[in-house]
Image (cartoon, coloured by chain):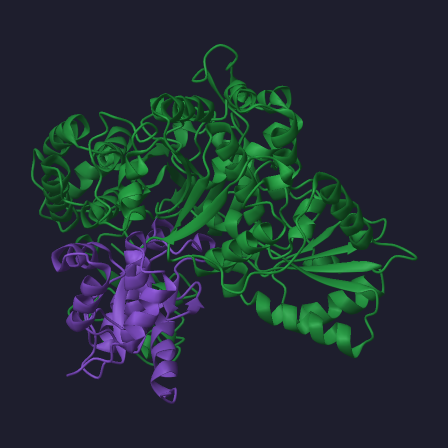
Chain colours: A green, B purple
Amino acid sequence: MRPKGEVKMNKVTIQGLAKIKEKTKAEMDLGEGRPYQARVIVHLGTCGISAGAEKILHAFEGLIKNRQGKGVHLSIAGCGGLCSREPMVTVELAGAPRATYVDVTAKDAKRIFEEHVLGKKAVTEKMLPPDDPFFKQQLFIVLRNRGLVDAEKIDEYIAQDGYSALAKVLTKMTPEEVIKTIKASGLRGRGGGGFPAGVKWETCRRAGEERGEERYVICNADEGDPGAFMDRSVIESDPHSVIEGMAIGAYAVGAKQGYVYIRKEYPLALEKLNIALALARAYGLLGQNIFGTPFSFDIEVHRGAGAFVCGESTALMASLEGRAGIPRAKYIHTVEYGLYNRPSCLNNVETWANVPPIINNGVEWFTRIGTGDVSTNPWGGSKGTKVFSLTGKVKNTGLIEVPMGIALREIIFNIGGGIEKGKKFKMVQTGGPSGGCLPESLLDLPVDFDSLTDAGSMMGSGGMIICDENTCLVDLAKYFISFLLEESCGKCVPCREGLRSMSAILDGITQGKGKKGDIKALQDLSKVMIQSSLCALGQSAPNPVLSSIKYFREEYERHIDDRKCPAGVCSALYEMSIDPKLCTGCMVCLRNCPANAISGAKQKPHVLDKKKCIKCNVCYTLCKFDAIKKE
Amino acid sequence: MAVDLTKVNEIIGKWEGRKDFLIEMLQDIQDEYYHLPREVLIEVSKVLEIPLNQIYEVATYYKAFSLTPKGRYTVSICQGTACHVQGADTVLSSFERKLGVKLGQTDKNLEFTLEAVRCLGCCGLAPVVTVNKDIYAKLEPSQVAKVVDKYKKMPHE
């Protein structure tokens, strides 16, 4: 979207950039004789807001106003990372390490303000210990500005060396040198495929040069994988890192126009991105003759309208042209004939955000992180970090960034803090609907592109969903297949009909109508789909089914042979009852049962009428005494 | 029923009448009229010189669009994986019972539309439900009635 009401500011030169950095740093620096002595940062990502962070912000505003909080800088930043403990607040005092507060309420805000901000004494019960494993084991490249910049203030980004990489490539490097650097860094596409970015850029430049045609850079922010929110968080928290990355890419491939294709389900990210674009334009960091060089470049934003398949490159480009997002066969790659049949360089949000630090810190720095060797072969390893959204039945859910090669076990049990409510780990699902599940025996697998693919899953865009013993594998496979069935564009038969058949079989199994031979039928269908579907949606759709059969075959067999769901998820395969030994007769389930299926008197064990029960699980979630049984 | 077309031309103007912004225009039209009325699509077709069948292809392809009017409040149940494993289905069936409509339907007073939505990206707070722009995190089936009643009591604008 083009921003309304352009902000008027002077165009920035390279010297100007350095001055802004200096000035902003001086302003932000805390201490005696400085404008501020303390800073309170409220994390206002979508997760934080839905947990009530805006209330906390207002609380601090009030406190600063009413108590003459002079010298206290109230700042806003994006995602704090630890979603399960939102709202989060960071407190900075001169000469002291940053303190992160979690699960902050308005009451806590008052205490934090009085005791820590004014009284210089931390409120330890609410503070995340400085050595908490959640943050300790992470390595920030993409999320380098987490909690440091307000997405709406371009100067704060510049203060963190923002746009210096763009200045460097425009004045000191040729496009070919930029491509060479990205190629040597081994940066591979973070959207799932893992295609080396430098190779893509090189092909795009060559195709454009050969045909003398305009080319485009595109940012894929149509993060559709259920369970993944890395891109949303990066754009909400640090949109300039993506803009700068795209501008560098545009210079390298020779593009004048860039596009961001973003989901409409991310209104906050869209808003922050548009503000960031307007500010970058106002500083002349986008537009004609950037930094006074011949390089001109601008970015336009398009909102997706709710189609998962639009994350696929050819579908995305069709949608950018204003058409239905239906993929085409990729005999010819989009990097040669993409948007409007011109060379188009598509990378996802995280890939673009990796570019500026690589330019600034160099190939050697980047290749030191990660696995394998990319010096001769760009596919030879996985370099840098990967951002994951860690969710599901794990204690610490949130957005994490870890070096490639870290073991899954480290992520789940150290960073994630293990399984919540003392339950048992069952499996981890990576790569969303196109990925697969990995059981406990594979937890020492290093996380990189190739290891995960070899194990039958994939890196994907970075969704990592942890499941405990209460997750039913067949139900999860059914969920992914029905999701994809809904999202298949219907153009090619294997995907359209294959998914429909798979969905019917899985439905049958979960409803206790499974037949001998169902597992074989699922495997056969998968084979056809993998070999003959038109695009990656259909080709990778069977992954969740195949990997769950591979690692949890007995669970399918229990459903089919014994008509039982061991995890107690498939509602046709269990019945609910109340354990009279555990029931205290507290009346909570009785009062809340929507079907009036529970009867009994106060302090006497209740009874559940199985004929009336609709298995809504209200009682199961409410019972504090584990008296509701599913068998 | 005659549809007021002045807004349509404003929306087309906002997007400079560019054909590649068709999807953006339709989203704004959807927000304005709560659905895509046929008269409006005919107008878009005329102004942009795009055949009506192509506009219908786009209008019926993307999930964001509806050819029938939606309710004042759209209840969107997140169907992301994290929400699924945290029990989004039981939340959904609670809404279905409370509202008396099935997934994808609108009640007859045009008050509530019940929708499933692909991942909202608040996976750490699963299961998540949105009602228009309000986000409800970690929603349990037992809290559903309270949420619905809140909107029922709200005075109409």
Q: Quadrant of the C terminus of chain A?
A: bottom left
Counting from the top left corner in percent of width and height, residue A387 is at 51, 38
Of A183 and A322, nearer the camera is A322
Counting from the top left corner in percent of width and height, residue A569 is at 27, 52
Is residue A596 at all visible to an observer of this figure?
no
Of A276 and A69, nearer the camera is A276
Question: For the view shown, which residue lies furthest in the bottom direction?
Answer: B155
Residue drawn 66% across the image and 44% down it: A132
Count of marks placed on residues: 0
Q: Quadrant of the N terminus of chain A?
A: bottom left
Residue drawn 27% across the image and 61% down it: B64
Q: Eyeballing the image, is A440 above or below A262?
A: above
Question: For the view shown, which residue lies furthest in the top direction?
Answer: A376
Residue drawn 39% across the image and 68% down it: A622
Q: Eyeballing the image, is B28 above or below A207?
A: below
Quarter of the image holding residue B153? bottom left
Is A62 positioned to the left or the right of A384 in the image?
Answer: right
Is A530 positioned to the left or the right of A418 in the image?
Answer: left
Quarter of the image holding residue A523? top left
Q: Eyeballing the image, is A539 above or below B132?
A: above
Is residue A213 at all visible to an observer of this figure?
yes
Of A350 and A159, nearer the camera is A159
Counting from the top left corner in percent of width and height, residue A198 is at 47, 23
Is A333 positioned to the left or the right of B129 in the image?
Answer: left
Counting from the top left corner in percent of width and height, residue A613 is at 21, 69
Q: Eyeballing the image, is B117 above or below A110?
A: above
